[in-house]
Image (cartoon, helix red, strand yellow):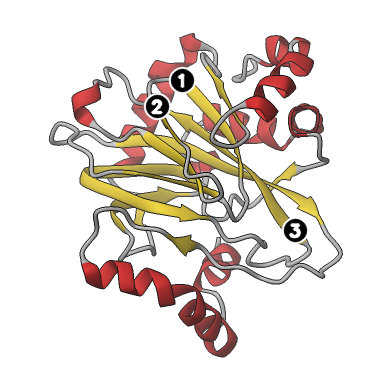
């Protein structure tokens, strides 16, 4: 059985493309009931079990708090192995191309992706993602695919995905409700993040992330993640301003920690 409700997505691809490009503050699409609902109990239970032993803390220790990651979907549950397979399939890539108007493919290593969880008080400062794949610099990031898995979510729990255009300043909030998928453009101006959450003790803001890339000729200059913290202490704001330069120097002399982790996996 397929995990993704693919047929309605394929049948509506032209209409969804129009929604995607017309969305504000920048191109994105919200899809309800992305996965087959009957599979969700097993998926949620498997992620809960994996979160007890397998997740590792995000490397974004300054601009993120209590954020944990587990990229190997295939090790969590057979259903997530099937989801990974479907995301990597050429059929899904063809649908993404129709959506975005650009030939793209999902990173097969899910570098920086997989299961993401935020514990109590977790936040992720507003940011624009790095543009080139840490291992293959001929892959340029184009789309983020974010699938939310938060049953019984309420507005007072926080954790809404905030979108803001660095070009216009326009904003939007997306509630991270169960089985909602957000596909968004990933460019220098497409800022996103979430404010500190107030989930009940022992529960997590949970999502699955995948990133779509397009081939480029190697001429694009590397841009690290650029942070734009809001309502943050002065030291965090100052560090955000110099962070891109520091990251470039670190990668030049010591290499990318993200790339090293990807190679180990």
At 40% from the left edge and 38% from the top edge, which residue is drawn? 162
Give whichever of 87, 159 is nearer the camera.
159
Quarter holding the C terminus?
bottom right
Task: Locate residue 169 relative to residue 187 in the image: left or right.
Answer: left
Residue 59, image quadrant: bottom left
Give whichever of 258, 261 is nearer the camera.
258
Residue 16: image location, x then y, percent = 70, 18
Work out whether 96 lies above or below 2: below
Q: Does label 3 or label 2 sit earlier along the sequence?
A: 3
- Furthest residue to the bottom? 253
Label 2 sits on residue: 149
**How far is mark 2 from mark 1, CA to CA?**
6 Å
Label 3 sits on residue: 139
**How far is mark 1 from mark 3, CA to CA?**
29 Å
Quarter holding the N terminus?
top right
Label 1 sits on residue: 179
Residue 31: image location, x then y, percent = 56, 19
Residue 224, image quadrant: bottom right
**Number of numbered labels in the structure image:** 3
Q: Are marks 2 and 1 in contact (CB under 8 Å)?
A: yes
Task: Locate residue 11 relative to residue 252 in the image: left or right.
Answer: right
Residue 171: image location, x then y, percent = 44, 36
């Amino acid at each position: 059985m397929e995990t993704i409700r693919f047929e309605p997505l394929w049948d509506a691809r032209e209409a969804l493309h129009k929604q995607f490009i017309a969305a504000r503050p920048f191109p994105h699409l919200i899809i309800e009931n992305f996965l087959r609902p009957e599979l969700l109990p097993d998926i949620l239970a498997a992620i809960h079990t994996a979160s007890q032993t397998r997740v590792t803390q995000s490397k974004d220790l300054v601009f993120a708090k209590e954020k944990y990651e587990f990229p190997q979907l295939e090790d969590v549950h057979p259903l997530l192995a099937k989801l990974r397979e479907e995301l990597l399939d050429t059929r899904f890539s063809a649908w993404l191309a129709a959506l975005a108007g650009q030939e793209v493919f999902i990173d097969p290593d899910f570098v920086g992706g997989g299961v993401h969880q935020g514990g109590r008080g977790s936040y992720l400062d507003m940011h624009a993602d790095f543009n080139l794949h840490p291992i293959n610099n001929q892959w340029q990031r184009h789309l983020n695919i974010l699938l939310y898995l938060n049953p019984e979510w309420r507005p007072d729990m926080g954790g809404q995905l905030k979108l803001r255009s660095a070009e216009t300043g326009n904003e939007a909030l997306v509630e991270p409700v169960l089985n909602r998928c957000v596909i968004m453009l990933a460019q220098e101006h497409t800022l996103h993040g979430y404010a500190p959450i107030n989930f009940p003790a022992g529960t997590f803001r949970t999502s699955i992330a995948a990133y779509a890339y397009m081939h480029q000729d190697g001429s694009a200059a590397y841009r690290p993640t650029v942070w734009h913290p809001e309502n943050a202490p002065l030291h965090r704001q100052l560090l955000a301003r110099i962070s891109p330069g520091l990251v470039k120097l670190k990668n030049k002399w010591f290499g990318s920690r993200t790339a090293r982790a990807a190679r180990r996996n």
